[in-house]
Image (spheres, helix red, strand yellow):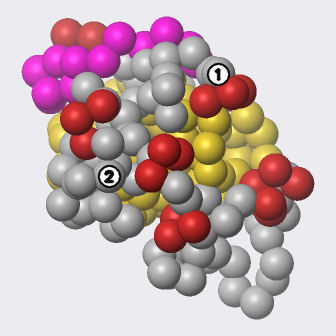
Amino acid sequence: MKRIETNLPGACIIEPEVHGDDRGFFMESYNQRDFAQLGINCTFVQDNHSRSQRGVIRGLHYQLERPQAKLVRVILGEVYDVAVDVRRGSETFGRWTSVTLSDENKRMFFMPEGFAHGFCVISEFAEFAYKCSDFYAPSAERGIIWNDPELAIGWPVGDDAPILSPKDAAYGPLSAMSESDLPAIGEVS
């Protein structure tokens, strides 16, 4: 496995070793020992899997009291994946990074606790799988509107309006979040 740094310290792209032949391919999508050697020492407690159609944006989500590090990948299709640093006191607060994840490139994206996460489906459909370092806690969930003008994320939606859940459509911009709804840099591990 290979770790590729992004412009946000802690958020990184993982390129697995893929063994392919005329039958198909094999890869380890997670190996605790190998990830520890790459500096990722999370204990993952929950796996999630979603399927979405082209134009769907899910996010930008994070959990406050029960922050989650996430390791995400695409099983089928292609997505534009985004992480935003929402840790008060961080030198990179309010900055974002992105990566294209697909079943073809087999890349994974790791973001530590204190990052908001979202993705946009750019293929006809995409199946998205991710590991979380804490359990989903609805009362701890927070979010930022996908098109926050101050973040200016380069979502690949063109002139089309994305397909959003009512919850995601109701989120406000990062600048409207109260300090009590943002993790502090020392509050996440």
Up/down of 13 relative to 22, above or below: below
x, y percentage for residue 113?
37, 34
Please name the residue shown 69% across and 86% down the image. Answer: 158
Q: Is residue 152 left or right of residue 40?
A: right
Cβ–Cβ under 8 Å for marks 1 and 2: no
Up/down of 14 relative to 117, above or below: above
SS at mark 2 in the image: loop
Report the front residue among 22 and 71: 71
Please name the residue shown 32% across and 52% down the image. Answer: 88
Per the rendered image, the range of residues in magenta is 35-49
x, y percentage for residue 179?
45, 52
Please name the residue shown 47% across and 75% down the image. Answer: 151
Q: Is residue 60 left or right of residue 161?
A: left
Please tell me whether mark 1 or mark 2 is closer to you in this view: 2
According to the image, label 2 marks what residue?
88
Up/down of 126 relative to 26, above or below: below
Q: Is residue 16 visible?
A: no
Label 1 crowding class (10 Å Cα cut-off): few <14, some 14-19, many 20+? few
x, y percentage for residue 79?
59, 56
* Callout 2 amino acid: Arg
Report the front residue among 159 and 21: 159
Q: Earlier in the sequence, mark 1 or mark 2?
A: 2
Q: Quadrant of residue 112?
A: top left
Q: Is residue 10 visible?
A: yes
